[in-house]
């Protein structure tokens, strides 16, 4: 093969010095974190946002943690709390008008008694039973913060793929008032912030053990260095299952940071120090909605009990979901899922591709169940001279919605192949309810 010289690796390399590369400076800017972590820049950034065990005193519950120094971002109950004391920060409320304003102004809002006492009790029981079960099974997943020095694992347990682990978690995704009494309020605020076609990116429980290390402050959008001052790309719903506050490491939040950070623009450095973080303070049963631009992170649990929250992340339908729900979801969850659940899991793709081209409004549950049963046949290399039995095989595509709909109209179907085709009823009856989301009214 003689390759044109312009296409050779040496030519491409010689003509791609760093200074001519597209968007290099922007993509490598490291912003907004580079400027956030500047020493002395933030009231809590003396050691940077990342924890530096080497500089902390030795006589603390966990080596490396310094729980006295008010200059540290995770010590939020002293000088930081004084800073915020006379500001009109969000308090738990049932009033959607106040919730909407808090979310706009501060980047988060607190829904009072979003879970009824019964809903909270059942949820807490299920989550803690599951956590202990996964520990006992040797399956517990420890992550989110750094391990304490000398310890192999972080002191924070995550429970993933919650939808498989209890009916109430499915009700959370659907915002069903049977499981979450404030469901309609949550749904409305998410619709207004994200548009009604958002997907569920991940839904997990985060349980801190006493004296976990804190998490670095971060935006959950996780698409740095892209910053948009107009609106967030993602929104989180946090179900608070224990009374939370400074005592047990209520989530560290920098109120208003959604505006301050995004105002720097994509790739831009922050020019002024940010205000300090607070510890989220709210009773169990509260739901916090916080948007993807807000700086926040897990605080230090200084109590002798665990602190449990659930976090559900919603993303725009063009974004990649964190959890691959279509693989994680149990067959029963998929088989019996409502159109809303299936949509939010991403089982109805919203862009070209899907599974073998099945995407245009169709569900992918049939394909996943067939793959699971080991009898999903993929279309491979075919040609006009392929043997009739190969052309007539029971390909998974034939059972898809688009395959079934177009089969009667195929213009060049070979009669020999047509004669061999058996009827192919789908093995999964898709929900009869209308697809979700409903067509938008003009
Ligand atoms: O544990 C918390 O309070 C917050 C967790 C969090 O922000 C995260 O894991 O991204
Ligand atoms: Fe986060």
Image: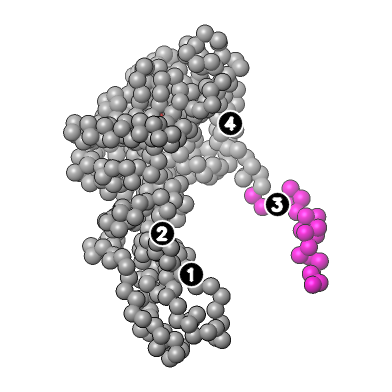
In this orientation, which residue lies closer to the viewer: 132 or 207?
A: 132
Of labels 3 and 4, earlier in sequence is 3
Q: Distance between the residues labelled 3 and 4?
A: 24 Å
Of labels 1 and 3, earlier in sequence is 3
Which residue lies at the image location 32% right of the left edge and 24% below the top edge? 244
| Vertical relation: 108 (above or below) 411 | above
Q: Say few, some or many: other residues with alpha carbon within 10 Å of mark 1 (under 14 / 14 to 19 / 20 or more).
A: some
Instruction: Report which quarter residue 39 is drawn in.
Output: top right
Q: How far apart are marks 4 and 1 (CA)?
A: 50 Å
User: Which region is colored magenta?
Assistant: 1-23
Q: How far apart are marks 2 and 4 (CA)?
A: 48 Å
Q: Which mark is residue 320?
A: none
Residue 192 coordinates in the image, percent (x, y): 32, 48
Of labels 2 and 4, earlier in sequence is 4
- Judging by the rendered image, the residue that carries numbered circle 4 is 35
- Judging by the rendered image, the residue that carries numbered circle 3 is 21
- Judging by the rendered image, the residue that carries numbered circle 2 is 372
Residue found at the very far top of the displayed protein: 59
Q: What element carries label 2?
A: helix
Of labels 3 and 2, earlier in sequence is 3
Q: Do we see residue 184 in this rendering?
A: no
Say whether mark 2 is within 8 Å of ligand 1.
no
Which residue lies at the image location 26% right of the left edge and 63% below the top edge? 431
Say whether mark 4 is within 8 Å of ligand 2.
no
Which residue lies at the image location 50% right of the left edge and 73% below the top edge? 379
- Judging by the rendered image, the residue that carries numbered circle 1 is 378
Residue 330 coordinates in the image, percent (x, y): 35, 51
């Amino acid at each position: 093969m003689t390759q044109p010289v312009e296409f050779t690796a040496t030519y491409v390399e010689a003509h791609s010095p760093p200074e001519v590369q597209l968007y290099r400076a922007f993509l490598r800017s490291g912003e907004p974190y580079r400027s956030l972590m500047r020493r002395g820049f933030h009231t809590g950034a003396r050691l940077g946002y990342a924890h530096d065990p080497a500089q902390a005193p030795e006589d603390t519950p966990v080596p490396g943690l310094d729980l006295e120094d008010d200059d540290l971002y995770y010590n939020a109950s002293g000088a930081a709390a004084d800073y915020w004391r006379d500001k009109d920060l969000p308090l738990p409320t049932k009033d959607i008008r106040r919730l909407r304003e808090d979310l706009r102004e501060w980047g988060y809002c607190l829904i009072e008694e979003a879970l009824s006492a019964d809903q909270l009790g059942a949820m807490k029981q299920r989550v803690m039973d599951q956590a202990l079960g996964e520990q006992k099974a040797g399956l517990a997943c420890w992550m989110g913060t750094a391990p304490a020095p000398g310890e192999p694992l972080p002191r924070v347990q995550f429970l993933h793929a919650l939808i498989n682990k209890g009916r109430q978690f499915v009700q959370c995704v659907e915002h069903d008032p049977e499981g979450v009494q404030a469901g309609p309020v949550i749904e409305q605020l998410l619709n207004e912030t994200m548009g009604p076609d958002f997907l569920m990116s991940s839904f997990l429980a985060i349980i801190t053990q006493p004296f976990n290390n804190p998490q670095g402050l971060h935006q959950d959008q996780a698409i740095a260095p892209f910053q948009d001052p107009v609106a967030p790309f993602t929104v989180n719903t946090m179900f608070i299952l224990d009374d939370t506050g400074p005592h047990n490491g209520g989530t560290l939040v920098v109120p208003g940071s959604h505006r301050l950070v995004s105002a720097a623009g994509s790739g831009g450095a922050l020019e002024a120090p940010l205000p300090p973080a607070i510890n989220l303070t709210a009773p169990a049963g509260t739901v916090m909605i916080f948007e993807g631009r807000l700086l926040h992170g897990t605080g230090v649990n200084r109590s002798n009990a665990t602190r449990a929250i659930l976090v559900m992340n919603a993303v725009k339908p063009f974004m990649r979901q964190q959890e691959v729900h279509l693989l994680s979801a149990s067959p029963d969850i998929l088989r019996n899922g409502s159109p809303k659940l299936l949509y939010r899991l991403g089982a109805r793709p919203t862009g070209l591709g899907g599974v073998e081209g099945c995407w245009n409004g169709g569900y992918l549950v049939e394909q996943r169940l067939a793959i699971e049963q080991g009898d999903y046949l993929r279309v491979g290399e075919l040609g006009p001279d392929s043997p009739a039995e190969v052309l007539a095989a029971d390909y998974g595509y034939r059972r898809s919605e688009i395959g079934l709909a177009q089969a009667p109209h195929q213009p060049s179907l070979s009669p020999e192949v047509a004669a061999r085709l058996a009827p192919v009823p789908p093995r999964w009856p898709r929900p009869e309810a209308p697809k979700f989301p409903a067509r938008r009214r003009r």
